[in-house]
């Protein structure tokens, strides 16, 4: 897949702006002190669904209806934030949305998708099983299957990073950004926005140590399936990499690092203590990676997105209590 160009991303930004304002972007003194660096946080936990995925759903749904104006129903699979994005965007266009989630999925993310008007179907033990069922169900019902990775999803998500890089004067962008990897739209979007913005910022991808498929694939140069055992970072619970995303990641990303559930929990606590923002596991993974590499980036300009705040209350309470 070719990365979308600047004009395409600017059109996507205009579309996203119709549904939401730019999310906050700022430094926090306590977080700077903790990391020993100048840390710019992009608060994607402040979108209308609490995660960056909303941007992709808005742009995808607009492009879909331009191509296929007769579409009446859409189907997708998710661990939560992508599903909220599709449900939100479908409702804006009067479409029926059905979302397939694995058994044991986040209770509060499930409730949020239902509140947005989606029909929820539970199937399988992980995301891959849910996605395969969604494909079959879409064919059976005649619904449009929304993929979890697509150029229009990337265009939409890239608007986050277009906002981020536009914040800085020429030559003052962070030296590095840390970006969590789920199925790949977020980090590919960052690469597209970096190219469109003309900055030289390094991109470091972050995976869960308990869902290492993308790190193993990045190192091997080919898709490598790996088991998922993370109990906290469900947004990074990928068992089978997306080949198109992997191609872009191998071309554009400087490194891919792993963080454990314990490190993610510590980052969730740090974000709450230092910024009073709530982060879900995947939403805190970028900070977890920065803290792991704290000595290397000491005194330098660093960027990260708090990419989602949709953690179940009971889970967050346990995380805070174990600190």
Image: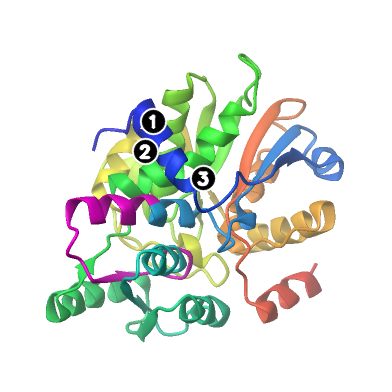
Q: Residues within 10 Å of mark 1 (few under 14, many from 20)?
A: some
Do residues under tags 2 and 1 come within 8 Å of each other at their CB atoms?
yes
Q: Which quadrant is the C terminus positioned in?
A: bottom right
Q: Quadrant of residue 196?
A: top left
Task: Please check the rendered image and state whether residue 286 is part of the magenta-colored stretch, yes or no.
Answer: no
Q: Work out whether mark 3 precedes mark 1 in sequence or the reverse, and give the earlier one.
A: 3
Left or right of 280 in this view: 118: left
How far apart marks 3 and 2 lie (CA) works out to 27 Å
Between tags 3 and 2, which lies in front? 3
Residue nearest the viewer, comparing 192 with 128: 192
How many marks are shown on the rendered structure?
Answer: 3
Identify residue for label 3.
17
Q: Residues within 10 Å of mark 2 (few under 14, many from 20)?
A: many
Residue nearest the viewer, comparing 88 with 259: 88
Give the residues drawn in magenta, as a range.
59-82
Q: Which quadrant is the N terminus positioned in?
A: top left
- Residue 174 visible in the current orientation: yes
Identify residue for label 1.
252
Left or right of 28 in this view: 287: left
Between tags 3 and 1, which lies in front? 3
Do residues under tags 3 and 1 come within 8 Å of each other at their CB atoms?
no
With respect to residue 243, does 169 lie above or below?
above
Residue 263 image position (x, y, % from top left): 66, 57
């Amino acid at each position: 897949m070719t990365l979308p160009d600047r004009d395409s991303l600017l059109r996507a930004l205009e579309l996203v702006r119709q549904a939401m304002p730019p999310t906050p972007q700022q430094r926090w003194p306590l977080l700077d002190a903790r990391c020993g660096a100048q840390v710019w946080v992009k608060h994607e936990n402040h979108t209308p669904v609490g995660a960056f995925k909303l941007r992709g759903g808005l742009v995808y749904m607009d492009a879909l209806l331009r191509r296929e104006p007769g579409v009446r129903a859409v189907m997708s699979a998710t661990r939560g934030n992508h599903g909220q994005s599709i449900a939100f965007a479908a409702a804006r266009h009067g479409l029926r949305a059905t979302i397939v989630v694995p058994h044991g999925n986040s209770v509060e993310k499930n409730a949020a998708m239902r509140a947005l008007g989606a029909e929820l179907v539970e199937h399988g033990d992980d995301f891959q099983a849910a996605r395969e069922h969604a494909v079959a169900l879409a064919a059976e019902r005649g619904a449009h299957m929304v993929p979890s990775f697509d150029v229009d999803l990337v265009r939409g998500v890239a608007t986050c990073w277009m906002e981020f890089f536009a914040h800085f004067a020429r030559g003052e962008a962070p030296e590095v950004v840390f970006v969590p990897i789920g199925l790949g739209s977020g980090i590919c979007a960052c690469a597209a926005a970096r190219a469109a913005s003309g900055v030289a910022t390094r991109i470091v991808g972050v995976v869960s140590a308990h869902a290492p498929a993308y790190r193993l694939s990045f190192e091997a140069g080919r898709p490598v399936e790996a088991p998922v055992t993370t109990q906290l970072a469900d947004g990074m619970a990928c068992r089978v990499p997306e080949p198109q995303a992997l191609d872009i990641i191998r071309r554009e990303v400087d490194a891919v690092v792993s963080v454990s559930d314990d490190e993610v929990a510590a980052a969730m606590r740090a974000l709450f203590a230092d910024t009073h923002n709530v982060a879900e596991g995947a939403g805190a993974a970028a900070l977890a990676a920065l803290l792991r590499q704290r000595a290397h980036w000491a005194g330098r300009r660093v960027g990260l997105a708090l990419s989602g705040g949709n953690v179940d209350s009971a889970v967050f309470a346990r995380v805070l209590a174990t600190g």
